[in-house]
């Protein structure tokens, strides 16, 4: 049964476990498994990827990269109504992400100094789309669309193969929709290594984006530590925090919590409410659903048993304060006049306001991105966006007069740091003739 606790009764240790909860310690996984796999892929290329895919997935690949025929076969076998649903979602995601495109910055001072910022796309990016327990075509849209809008020239998809060694049909359909030609049919550390280092058939990426299991996360981290790639963030279990007042519909709240719990056994679902009555009704709805055996019953039950929690707060303000420290991946705010509180809410990966904005609509359709920081990382990082695929380059142009104005300060500052010979000198030498 999901526990109901008073927020004020939580101990310092209990709060600490909630606030600083990021994932598993993957040190042993990194040393014992991931580093050897990455090094093997570096040495043997495609042969290593094929070998590890057979070892871990039980699939013997004919080729590391999906053929054009596999991609188009997925398109042909996808029902028109399903394809249309993803096409509508694609349009919504494109519409919202186009608003994120940045223009350059240019500033000119009276002394002739010109300063600016160029926003330029990363040239090559790889998008990881999890597989295994389920297929996630929506994640193809969430990773690829902002990369395309940013202007990334080379986009590679990484995803585990189906049991037949082919690209899952629905993934192929979305790749066809987005004109993605390069799909690495291998997940885990070997798929990440293929894109991060490059092989005979896979071009090296400069950035890898997308969530995965502990082996994917460890592989991304290791490649980043080598300076081989940039990564988005370290992904942990998915999570939702719901803040609801006493007028919220308890069944809606319960189903939103359970929709997160059905992701996997490690998912976290928490309700914060000032209403003890709502807390108890939500608990009863959850227990009734788990007793029914519907859907992904075992996964939901394991998630609720491990990480499900209902907290009764003094008021909505106290609930918001908790959320700001918790830094949830998803936060639903089911209260009267939710926009009135918008300025007080911080540190959320993606925010869902009101009674009619369940996380599922953002996961699939509304247009925001569902690749988000987890484990409290929303306190210092953001979800995937067009910015994820951009580089910022600053530039400056100085007139002779502007450099003359800077000469004294630069010489003084370089002197105190012990670099007056050439740091300060590089300015002074330009005025020797005077």
Image (cartoon, rainbow, N blue to C red):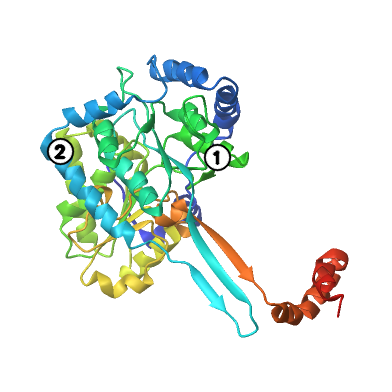
| Farthest-out residue, bottom | 110
Please determine whether, in this image, residue 191 is positioned above or below residue 155: above
From this viewpoint, is residue 164 visible? yes
* Residue 136 percent location from the top left of the image: 29, 37
Q: Secondary structure at mark 2?
A: helix
Residue located 30% across and 17% down the image:
164
| Farthest-out residue, front | 433
Task: Place residue 249 in its image quadrant.
Answer: bottom left
* Residue 3 percent location from the top left of the image: 31, 48
Query: From mark 1 to mark 2, how far is it between C-alphas?
Result: 35 Å
Q: Which residue is mark 2?
A: 82
Quarter the N terminus occupies:
top left
* Residue 84 percent location from the top left of the image: 15, 43
Q: Which mark is residue 221?
A: 1
Residue located 83% across and 76% down the image:
431
Quarter the C terminus occupies:
bottom right
Please determine whether, in this image, residue 239 is positioned above or below residue 51: below
Residue located 30% across and 55% down the image:
368
* Residue 389 percent location from the top left of the image: 45, 51
| In the image: residue 231, left or right of residue 163 | right
Callout 2 crowding tier (Cα within 10 Å): few <14, some 14–19, many ≥20: few
| In the image: residue 403, left or right of residue 322 | right
Residue located 42% across and 61% down the image:
347
Point out the tag, 1 or 2, that comes first from the N-terminus.
2
Please determine whether, in this image, residue 348 is positioned above or below residue 3: below
Asked if marks 1 and 2 touch (Cβ < 8 Å), the reply is no
């Amino acid at each position: 049964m999901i526990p109901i606790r008073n927020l004020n009764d939580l101990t310092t240790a209990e709060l600490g476990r909630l606030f600083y909860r990021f994932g598993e310690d993957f040190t042993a996984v990194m040393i014992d498994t991931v580093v050897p796999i990455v090094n093997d892929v570096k040495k043997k290329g495609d042969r290593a990827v094929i070998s590890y895919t057979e070892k871990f997935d039980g699939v013997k690949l004919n080729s590391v990269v999906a053929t054009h025929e596999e991609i188009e076969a997925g398109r042909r076998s996808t029902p028109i109504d399903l394809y249309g649903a993803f096409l509508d979602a694609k349009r919504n995601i494109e519409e919202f992400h186009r608003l994120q495109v940045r223009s350059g910055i240019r500033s000119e001072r009276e002394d002739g100094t010109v300063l600016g910022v160029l926003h330029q796309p990363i040239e090559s990016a790889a998008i990881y789309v999890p597989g295994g327990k389920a297929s996630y075509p929506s994640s193809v849209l969430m990773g690829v669309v902002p990369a395309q809008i940013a202007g990334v020239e080379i986009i590679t998809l990484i995803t585990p193969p189906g049991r037949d060694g082919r690209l899952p049909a629905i993934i192929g359909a979305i790749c066809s929709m987005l004109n993605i030609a390069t799909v690495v049919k291998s997940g885990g550390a070997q798929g990440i290594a293929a894109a991060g280092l490059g092989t005979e058939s896979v071009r090296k990426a400069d950035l890898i984006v997308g969530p995965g299991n502990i082996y994917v996360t460890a592989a991304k981290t290791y490649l980043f530590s080598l300076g081989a790639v940039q990564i988005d963030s370290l992904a942990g279990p998915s999570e939702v925090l719901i803040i609801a007042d006493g007028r919220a519909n308890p069944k809606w709240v319960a189903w939103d919590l359970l929709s997160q719990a059905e992701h996997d056994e490690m998912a976290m679902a928490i309700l914060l409410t000032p209403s003890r009555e709502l807390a108890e009704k939500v608990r009863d709805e959850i227990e009734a659903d788990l007793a029914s055996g519907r859907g992904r019953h075992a996964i939901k039950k394991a998630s609720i048993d491990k990480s499900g929690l209902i907290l009764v707060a003094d008021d909505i303000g106290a609930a918001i304060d908790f959320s700001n420290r918790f830094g949830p991946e998803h936060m639903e705010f089911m209260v009267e006049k939710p926009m009135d509180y918008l300025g007080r809410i911080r540190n959320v990966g993606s925010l869902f306001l009101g009674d009619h904005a369940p996380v599922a609509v953002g996961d699939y359709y509304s247009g925001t991105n569902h690749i988000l920081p987890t484990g409290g990382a929303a306190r210092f990082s953001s979800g995937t966006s067009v910015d994820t695929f951009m580089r910022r380059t600053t530039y400056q142009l100085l007139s002779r007069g502007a450099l003359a104005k800077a000469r004294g300060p630069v010489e003084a500052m370089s002197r105190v740091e012990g670099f007056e010979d050439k740091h300060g000198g590089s300015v002074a030498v330009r005025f020797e003739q005077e």
